[in-house]
Amino acid sequence: MKKILLIEDTEDVRQSTAEILELANYEIETAENGITGVEKVHEFKPDLIICDIMMPDLDGYGVLHILSKKPETASIPFIFLTAKSERRDIRKGMIQGADDYLTKPFEEVELLDAVESRFKKKALLKEVFTKDLDGLHKFFEDVSTFEDLKDISKDRSLKTYRYKSYVYTEGTPAYMAFFIQTGKVKTYKTNENGKEFVTGIYGQGEFIGYMSLIGGSEEYSESAVVLEDAEICAIPKEDFNKLLYANKSVSEKFISMLSSNLQERELQLMEIAYNSVRQRVARKLVELHDKYTAQSNREDAATNIQITREDLAGMVGTAKETLIRTMSDFREEGLIGSDKKGITILNKDQLSLISAWGNL
């Protein structure tokens, strides 16, 4: 049974609201003021808090402020009750972190809908979505049940991209983010001399093209070209922005789905700044080996990595000639093999040690 803490200083409102929630099969604890409410949060450990704004001693804003500063209570969904409909009061509460508000007097159905919506959003944060088109469809289906996302696009069909075809190019209008269902895609930037810097290699379950949308740019800041025939789903910029900004709970979940890409980009830039070429090449080979192994569902250690020397040099941030010398060293040490089909990792453990410690 879900537990709700109701903080309300007006006795008749407190009693009638508690009765409605108890009839809806929620376990209810009440508090007659903000100070008592904060104390009961730690004793009762509610799944949701409903709190009046205008109260003596400690008002609803104060209650929310105190709870938001403590890790154990900051994530509890919070609904404000207010006798005022002034927009500034509502806006102040939402800015401080409230999840929703109800204006008194309210109908029973309004109260229950607001509570159900909060629990639904909390469940969304805990749900694990598969990294494929079915998982993406399920995510969109779930978020479209929320009032502020009900008009999100239903069209998420796949488009097939052939080898060497472009998904988008640097400098063109940024109007879509993209989700890769199958295949592999390389992203890269080009400097004023026409030299490529590879920013990533992406495969099944990963998003591309969204960094320009997050940054508010009107143009893509990099190009994306297909390395293996790919099936890709486009997410319109308008839908992407709604997922990111329209609803706090949905935003948190969506960011967590993007976070692996963000972490990978940050790690790549840190490595270029601080690690040796030998370390960077070793780490990238291990990373690509793991990605290719996972996406091909193969457990053998001899997974073939299909990547050009130019692309690998761009990914580790070094000249092609320097990369070739490092790769030759690795071959002589028995760490890798290579032929026209690609690169084979022969000693992943030693490469992992080199990526961590450098000159081994």
Image: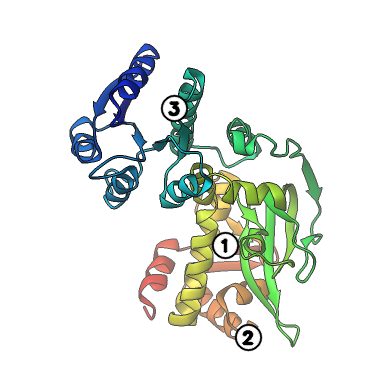
Foreground label between 3 and 2: 3
Q: Earlier in the sequence, mark 1 or mark 2?
A: 2
Q: Nearer the viewer, residue 284 or 25?
A: 25
Q: Earlier in the sequence, mark 3 or mark 2?
A: 3
**Numbered label attached to residue 241:** none
Q: In which quarter of the view is residue 45 placed?
A: top left
Q: In which quarter of the view is residue 352 placed?
A: bottom left
In the rendered image, the vertical position of residue 177 relative to residue 337, given as above or below: above
For disc 1, the marked residue is 344
Residue appearing at x 22%, y 30% in the figure: 44
In the image, farthest residue toward the top: 23
**Mark 3 → mark 2, Cα distance in angstroms:** 62 Å
For disc 3, the marked residue is 115
For mark 1, does the 10 Å Cα neighbourhood hold few (<14), some (14 to 19), or many (20 or more) residues? Answer: many
In the rendered image, the vertical position of residue 310 relative to residue 41, given as above or below: below
Answer left or right for 160 relative to 253: right
In the rendered image, the vertical position of residue 211 relative to residue 150, given as above or below: below
For disc 2, the marked residue is 321
Q: Amino acid at mark 3?
A: Val
